[in-house]
Image: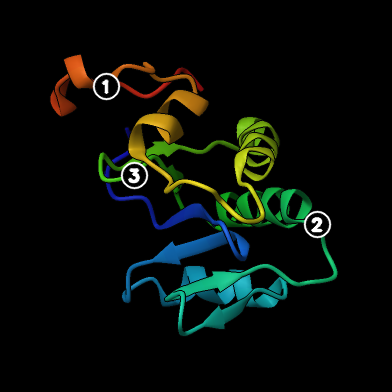
Amino acid sequence: MISNPHVVFDTDPKRGLLARSGWEQVEARAVLRDLGWEWQEELHALVPPTDTPDVDAGVQAVEQLHMHGYRTGFSVGPFGAIRLTTARAEQVFTRATATEPAHPTEPDTTKTRYAAYGGPSNLDSVSPQALTAPPL
């Protein structure tokens, strides 16, 4: 897990890739806005430009954020975020966008999301403190 990332990426079943940050991360959000990301009030997040595939927009965002010295992560539910490096961004975003159905038939759960990114698939027997992020 990463502590205190400046920007955390996530996916939304209806919208796709999202970028969230704390209110104090004005400069990090400015980097994303310069890349064409737009604020969506109902999602409380920035969304990538519609003319760019989510994976490409996400990779470009991670590269630019890292170039400006910001830490990035990818959400794994209530347990926090895994560290998102430039080298792994394309793989993580490809997995994330491929596993997000256009119209989910069942609610997204932390168990299925964490397993999709290399974590244990049976979280019932694992305490939150024992969880570790997959190697990046």
Q: Please name whichever residue, 31 or 41, is drawn nearer the observer in this view of the structure.
A: 41
Quarter of image, res 42: bottom left
Sequence-first disc among 3 and 2: 2
Identity of the residue drawn at 44% across and 35% down: 113
| Outermost right residue | 51
Residue 124 in which image quadrant: top left
Q: Circle 2 sits on which residue? A: 53
Mark 2 Cα shell of 10 Å, populated few (<14), some (14-19), many (≥20)? few
Three-letter residue code for mark 3: Gly
Residue assigned mark 1: 123
x and y, in percent, of residue 87 in the image: 65, 31
Q: Which mark is residue 111?
A: none
Instruction: Indicate left or right for 131 with 32 as reference.
Output: left
- Residue 43 or 8: which is nearer the viewer? 43
- 74 vs 25, nearest the viewer: 74
Mark 3 to mark 1 CA distance (whole Å): 12 Å
Q: Is residue 111 above or below residue 17?
A: above
Of helix, strand and loop, which one carries label 1? helix
Residue at 37 percent across and 24 percent down: it is: 133
Q: Do tag 1 and tag 2 residues touch (Cβ < 8 Å)?
A: no
Q: Are the two marked residues, 3 and 2, in contact with CB atoms closer than 8 angstroms? A: no
According to the picture, the residue beneath numbered tag 3 turns out to be 77
Question: What whole-number distance in Å separates the C-alpha atoms at marks 3 and 2?
Answer: 24 Å
